[in-house]
Image (cartoon, rainbow, N blue to C red):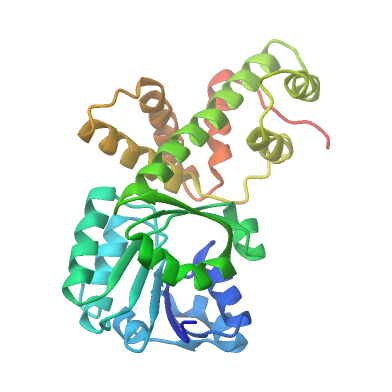
């Protein structure tokens, strides 16, 4: 069992993940650019580091979950980054959703320090993070995964090995392209039905009685009907993941015309200032253009 964990990134997902590790009895040292976000964890028993390097200095396992590729680059390779202090034999588990190609480069940097790297993005939203029920998609050496599994089992219910370095991220980008498209098309259909005079609850009953029913939209619909876009996963991050999916598809010579169109819709909603809302807020752009609101009593 790894006794010491450095944990970097205390956002919507990172905070509950780090808290679960503290509760499980690990010695956890956390770092976040905004120190105030670390204070509740400090009260729960975590140590707070001034830099990523300090968080990694004595760690057997370093976990990273930050917003994008640039943020990962900063906490790994930048001044005060983990590469300055990363121990030989340590494992870095990066649960950020970033470029698979760049992640492979970081794995090489870690290997140069005698450490191992796993790309391990997650799905399950903040509820899954709070309950320790995330699903991990993992790329890297299988032996490293086996060593990291006791830590990952505190955080998730499912740990799916996808293959070599970058494979977990490729799987995550494919999943988010599907998820983003499902929600956007659901929103298009409901805006159309509402504009045509069909009540949203009536349309929802039809969907739930048809092959179009999906667990994702079952979950999102009540929030949309209330106009509650409290972020479970921010729209700006979904747009970022769609951009990464497009880059990966281009590199692999894979056409993704539907996902490319959906990316533009999320991009427009982001440009309207909706980036910090849940990604289901993409419906508000469609509503504004159509001149209707898809709202219903719960």
Residue 62 versus residue 72: which sits nearer the camera? 62
Residue 145 sits in which quadrant? bottom left
Q: Is residue 263 above or below residue 96?
A: above
> Picture coordinates of residue 51 (x, y %)?
32, 82
Which residue shows up at 80% across the image and 20% down it? Answer: 202
Is residue 287 among the parts visible in the rendering? yes
Q: Is residue 121 above or below residue 10?
A: above
Would you say 274 lies left or right of 206 here? Answer: left
Is residue 9 among the parts visible in the rendering? no
Taking the view exactly as shown, the residue that stands out farthest to the right is: 298
Residue 222 sits in which quadrant? top right
Residue 213 versus residue 87: which sits nearer the camera? 87
**Quadrant (top left, top right, bottom left, bottom right) of the C terminus:** top right
Which residue shows up at 31% across the image and 66% down it? Answer: 117
Residue 27 versus residue 240: which sits nearer the camera? 27
Residue 87 sits in which quadrant? bottom left
Which residue shows up at 62% across the image and 51% down it? Answer: 230
Taking the view exactly as shown, the residue that stands out farthest to the top is: 196
Which residue shows up at 23% across the image and 49% down it? Answer: 101
> Picture coordinates of residue 30 (x, y %)?
45, 80
Would you say 220 lies left or right of 288 here? Answer: right
> Picture coordinates of residue 179 (x, y %)?
52, 36
Taking the view exactly as shown, the residue that stands out farthest to the left is: 112
Q: Is residue 65 above or below residue 290?
A: below
> Picture coordinates of residue 4 (x, y %)?
45, 86
Would you say 113 lies left or right of 232 here? Answer: left
Total numbered labels placed on residues in the image: 0
Q: Is residue 244 above or below residue 149?
A: above
């Amino acid at each position: 069992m790894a006794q010491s964990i450095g944990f970097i990134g205390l956002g919507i997902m990172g905070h509950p993940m780090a808290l679960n590790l503290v509760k499980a009895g690990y010695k956890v040292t956390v770092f976040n650019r905004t120190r105030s976000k670390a204070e509740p964890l400090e009260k729960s028993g975590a140590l707070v580091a001034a830099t990523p390097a300090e968080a990694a200095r004595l760690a057997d396992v370093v976990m990273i979950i930050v917003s994008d590729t640039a943020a990962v680059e900063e906490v790994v390779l930048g001044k005060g980054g983990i590469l300055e202090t990363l121990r030989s034999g340590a494992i870095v588990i990066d649960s950020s959703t970033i470029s698979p190609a760049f992640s492979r480069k970081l794995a090489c940097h870690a290997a140069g320090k005698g450490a191992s790297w796993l790309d391990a993005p997650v799905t399950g939203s903040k509820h899954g993070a709070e309950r320790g029920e995330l699903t991990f998609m993992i790329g890297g050496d299988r032996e490293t995964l086996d060593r990291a599994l006791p830590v990952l089992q505190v955080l998730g219910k499912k740990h799916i090995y996808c293959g070599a370095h970058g494979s977990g991220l490729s799987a995550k980008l494919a999943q988010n392209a599907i998820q983003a498209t499902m929600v956007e098309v659901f929103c298009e259909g409901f805006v159309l039905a509402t504009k045509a005079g069909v009540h949203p609850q009536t349309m929802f009953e039809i969907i739930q009685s048809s092959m179009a029913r999906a667990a994702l939209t079952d979950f999102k619909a009540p929030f949309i009907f209330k106009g509650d876009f409290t972020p479970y996963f921010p729209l700006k991050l979904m747009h970022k993941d769609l951009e990464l999916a497009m880059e990966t598809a281009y590199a692999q010579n894979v056409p993704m015309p539907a996902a490319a169109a959906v990316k533009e819709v999320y991009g427009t909603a982001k440009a309207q200032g909706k980036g910090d809302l849940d990604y289901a807020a993409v419906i508000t752009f469609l509503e504004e253009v159509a001149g209707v609101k898809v709202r219903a009593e719960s």
